Image (tube, rainbow, N blue to C red):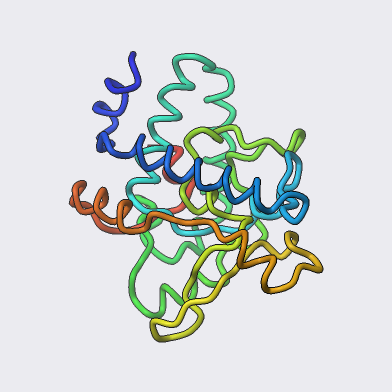
């Protein structure tokens, strides 16, 4: 099935492909400016451990990836699904939300529980033997922007600061970090989410099993 047809089947808005291209281009530009300051390499998997929230756009993209793999590499798709089922089985009792649907809760108590949830668990998309993400082409936006300096909330208000992976920019000065800032198209992504008309968040394991 052509990519456009696959996106339609999975419910992804057409603009998701453009979003991915923009973000990947921004990452490549930031990485070029960062040079050796950016430590991200195949086999460095620190960012592949610990649960994090993904939005519906990310979840649909992962679903499209799994559908593609089931057609082109069924054994790999089955292995990823096996790891995802094992992850869910291990973490379901402490899941701060609906463990049947995978939807994260949005109460203050559930959000607080999520801060400490599955912090050491490996992502089921990660091949532990190779350090490779088996759904790399369809990975969530959080994964695509992790590493280089990006703007993020610094406190309870609207204040923002540059943050980056702790393994990157070791010994770099503030100026070095600032010159390597990666632009992230948050408004474009938000517009696509509005187009979907779906709210709520989940985690990677549940998205892989849809």
Residue at image position (31%, 58%) is 187
In the displayed structure, 112 sits above or below 62; it is: below
Q: Position of residue 171 (x, y in %)?
A: 81, 68
Residue located at (34% from left, 76% from top): 107
The outermost residue toward the bottom is 156
Query: Residue 112 in the image: x percent, y percent?
Result: 47, 77
Instruction: Say whether residue 13 is left or right of residue 169.
Output: left
95 relative to 43, above or below: below
Q: Is residue 92 left or right of residue 31?
A: left
Residue lying at 73% horizontally and 49% vertically, measured from the top left: 35
Position of residue 184 relative to residue 82, above or below, is below
Number of marks? 0
Q: Residue 25 at what x, y percent from top left?
A: 50, 41
Residue 208 point in image, percent of width and height: 46, 38
If the image is split into quadrants, where does the C terminus sit? Answer: top left
In the rendered image, the quadrant that contains the N terminus is: top left
* Residue occupying image coordinates x 57% and y 46%: 29
């Amino acid at each position: 099935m052509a990519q456009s047809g696959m996106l339609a089947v999975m419910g992804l808005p057409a603009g998701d492909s453009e979003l991915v291209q923009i973000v990947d281009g921004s990452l490549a530009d930031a990485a070029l400016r960062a040079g050796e300051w950016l430590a991200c390499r195949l086999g460095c998997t620190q960012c592949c451990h610990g649960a994090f929230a993904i939005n519906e756009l990310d979840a649909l993209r992962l679903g499209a990836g799994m559908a593609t793999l089931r057609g082109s590499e069924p054994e790999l798709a089955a292995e990823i699904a096996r790891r995802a089922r094992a992850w869910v089985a291990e973490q379901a009792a402490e899941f701060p939300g609906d463990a049947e649907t995978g939807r994260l809760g949005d109460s203050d108590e559930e959000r607080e529980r999520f801060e400490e949830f599955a912090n050491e668990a490996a992502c089921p998309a990660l091949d532990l033997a190779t350090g490779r993400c088996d759904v790399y082409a369809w990975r969530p936006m959080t994964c695509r922007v992790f590493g280089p300096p990006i703007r993020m909330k610094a406190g309870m208000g609207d204040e923002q600061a540059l943050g980056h992976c702790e393994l990157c920019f070791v010994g770099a000065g503030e100026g070095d970090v600032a010159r390597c800032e990666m632009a992230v198209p948050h408004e474009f992504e938000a517009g696509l989410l509005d187009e979907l008309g779906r709210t709520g968040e989940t985690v990677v394991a549940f998205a892989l099993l849809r």
